[in-house]
Amino acid sequence: MRVATLALWASGCVGDASAESSSATAAAEPPATHSNILRADYAGSASCRTCHKSLYDDWLGSPMRQMTRLPATAAIRAPFDGRTWKFKDDQARFELQAGTRFVRVQSRRFGDHLYRVTRVIGGRTREDFAGVEVTGTQPDARIIGDVHDEVILPASYFFETASFRLKGYSVMVRERPGLKAGAVWNQSCVLCHNTAPAFLSLWGALLGKGAPAYQGEVVDALLPENRRWGLQIADSNAVRAAVADEVHLLGGASDAPTDLPTSLRQGITEMSQRFGADHLLEIGIGCEACHGGCREHVQQPRVSTSYEPRSPFLRVQPAPGHGPITRAESINRTCARCHQVLFSRYPFTWEGGLRHSGSPGGSSTNSGEARDLLLGGCSRALACTDCHDPHRDDDPDDLAALATPAGNATCTKCHAAYASRETLRSHAHHDPEAAGGVCINCHMPRKNLALTYTLGRYHRIGSPTEGARVQGDRPLECALCHARKSAEELVSEMERWWGKRYDRQALQALYGDLQQPPLLSTLARGKPHEQAVAIISLREQKVREALPLLARQITHPLPLVRYQARKAINALVGRDCNIDLDRNLRDIIAATERCVPQAAPIAPGAPVREAPSSRHDED
């Protein structure tokens, strides 16, 4: 049998995958589905309604379901009322003509283009758009180029500010020179934002080292070797036939290669070039995008589903010494099919890592949460669904409750020793009834850039005292709550309370003067993602003395950092400074200096080197 490496995938419907991990209990469990990854294994979301009506009804209005929508039937928040949005020397006009939406782009550098909107993407914090270029707004206007080449349009509508923003500026990308359409939709983001056979995502892992990159694949290198799962192939001819079936459906070559590696390579190439909306199982995230093909379960409800990929020709094989697969990690790997990405060409990760290294650290922006959870210490016992409901939008009050002493109950289900006030006080060295006694405030600190101009929680569950974090990252995580304490004060307390020792020379390389607060030192010396975290924390803790340093970040080469700096300046000054970050640099600097006159002369920041482009890049 051939073993191919695979990371970050598991699928199923409502069954418990732990049933498959113990032969001792197998006889007591219902039979599991034989196959849940091929196109023929899928029954469609509507088939779930009869038995799971409450969950189905919740899902209909969920962010998952709304991830990709058709504009003719979608409730769209972005105003297509003829308004014009200006970006530097360019502009985009958002029009509604006879019920059809258009985006008219005029760019000094990239020319003038008219796009008919064909897809609305997202809807929880912003809306993105895909469209085809057309010669006019008439219903019979000619499409320019291939009818299947729906491109990502250059503007997003951002709900927090009720305004348009350049597409891609939600992640750590460099400043862009003008308005230009992005990647082709069906070649860049279609598989994670819609429902397709899970088998397609496995081809790269089945082929192994040297496989061509493609959108929607599972990315093995994003987990350490001892946490990866493998796929054991039982029948290579059956795999090859299944690939050939998909290639034939896509309109590819009819003559299937006789060997499996060539077949997989051909399949990846054909899918990258030909896969389109017509080949999806459903638009948006359907039930089976997460739960896997459920046709057997629908036909015979006694047949349970599995959170692992299953087929007669392959089976999951964890890394040696892994132990039985738990239900929690199976759920987490299901989520990590999409929530695994280190978005954009930005090279840096947490723990002082690099995106394209052999062992990248945790992600610093949204959408890497499930992979980050798998990197931490609780991924075999704590499931994403212990805190989040994938069938509906999370209730803000429910999430807020997790960040209270009452929310500690989620953690003390396993860590029962810290359930009492006395043991928690001894462990945390903080008041157990205050913020310092909340488990996730220290073990899942708010240090990741969310899709709004706020911080989300870092899902690589660990300790703020870990050497890799203290000596590899800025700012010290304790500074996220203690903004005015110096680095030396914080480090000395950690050493005294938890018996740790930290290299002062390494810390000086990070912060310079250890008598300064780490947030201010990070703002002056940090990497862009570290600076953004410092900016938000300084704003939230109302550190007005940071204003001169904040003003200097208004010309940061990464626009996302600029947005954070503007929000912090407005908050600390106490008024809207009218800093329009879509204007030219001269106007941005002038508006900032009028608002923060005590700032030193502002100069453009040094460029940040980007990693090579790939199909996984959001921008």
Image (cartoon, helix red, strand yellow):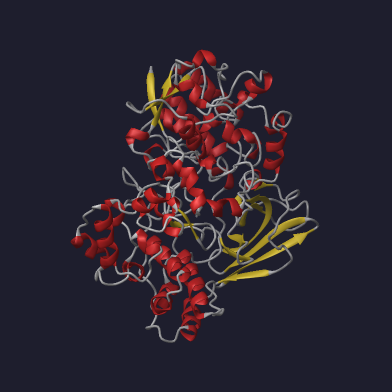
Q: Residue at x 77, y 51 (%)?
A: 140
Tell which residue pokes out farthest to the top in this image: 27
Residue 38 in picture, x, y percent from top left = 57, 25
- 323 shown above or below 376: above
Residue 291 in view:
yes
User: Measuring 71% from the left and 37% from the top, which residue is drawn there?
Assistant: 54
Q: Position of residue 150 (x, y in %)?
A: 62, 48
- Where, by quadrant of the figure, is residue 285 drawn? top right
* Residue found farthest to the front: 422
Q: In this view, does 94 lie above or below 55?
A: below
From the image, which quarter does the N terminus lie in? Answer: top left
Residue 471 in view here: no
Give the residue drawn at x 38%, y 20%: 2
The answer to whether 3 appears left or right of 290 in the picture is left
Left or right for 323, reference 64: left
Q: In this view, does 389 lie above or below 428?
A: above
Residue 155 position within the rendered picture, expressed as x and y whole percent measured from the top left: 60, 61
Taking depth in this image into account, of 59 and 66 the one nearest to the observer is: 59
Task: Please name whichever residue, 36 or 436, is drawn nearer the observer in this view of the structure.
Answer: 436
